[in-house]
Amino acid sequence: AQRVTQPEKLLSVFKGAPVELKCNYSYSGSPELFWYVQYSRQRLQLLLRHISRESIKGFTADLNKGETSFHLKKPFAQEEDSAMYYCALRGDYGGATNKLIFGTGTLLAVQP
Amino acid sequence: EPEVTQTPSHQVTQMGQEVILRCVPISNHLYFYWYRQILGQKVEFLVSFYNNEISEKSEIFDDQFSVERPDGSNFTLKIRSTKLEDSAMYFCASRTSGIYEQYFGPGTRLTVT
């Protein structure tokens, strides 16, 4: 079964502290994973995808196939990072669908 | 930067009524999606649409739901006879060919009373 698990509903950190948002997945093939972010009252936006291996706004995520994880990390949290973060898996590799399978999301609250 | 737009932002309807949620995908995109998010739950896939037909639908997308691309710009989701449990945020998304990043609209909050 294709599944994404984000074990933490809420992660509260102080400004300047490191952040790690956990994501584990279940997928039989070679996965393609994304992190989406939703700031207050805004749309879902792509933060990063594992294929591009880029760093956006200081966030990075490494795909660990052995642990089936794609945790999102940032060394120093900023107050503007406060948002809802969703991990997503591209399902049904190939074909015309390529739907996204989302985790339940983690609310990151960065305290001053 | 082009964006996916959705109207209305909030729709209140009575149980049993038909609703149509509208989306305008990014103009050169070819793949279109509807997702929904019930309050407090995860974002769930409803349906994907490509080349003027449904390419996949989820178990949620039963006979009460339909999608249409009536012209070159709009992409609609119709719920024929709404139920209380249809109350949710509905997101439209689109993507272009060869790139799997989906661009999301701001969502329509549907409240069924």
Image: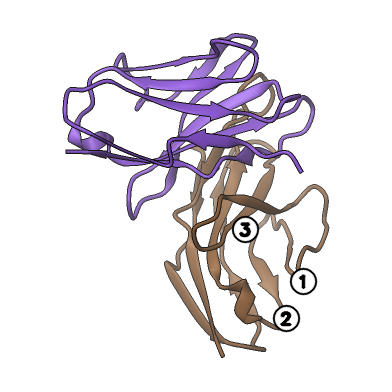
Badge 1 amino acid: Gly
Is label 2 in contact with label 1 (beta carbons under 8 Å)?
Answer: yes
Left or right: A96, with A23 as reference point: right
Left or right: B82, with A49 as reference point: left
Q: Position of residue A36 (x, y in %)?
A: 61, 53
Name which of mark 3 and mark 1 comes first in the sequence: 1
On whether disc 2 and disc 1 are found on a single subunit, the reply is yes
Q: Is residue B84 above or below residue A88?
A: above
Q: Which residue is mark 2?
A: A75
Residue B15 quadrant: top left
* Residue in the foreground of this view, choosing between A75 and B93: B93
Secondary element type, mark 2: loop
Q: Is residue A71 above or below residue A99?
A: below
Q: Which chain is brown?
A: A
Chain bearing mark 3: A
Q: Which residue is mark 1?
A: A58
Left or right: A12, with B40 as reference point: right
Left or right: B93, with A56 as reference point: left
Mark 1 nearby-residue class (10 Å; few <14, some 14–19, many ≥20) = few
Q: Position of residue B94 (x, y in %)?
A: 64, 31
Q: Which residue is mark 3?
A: A69
Q: Which chain is purple?
A: B
Secondary element type, mark 1: loop
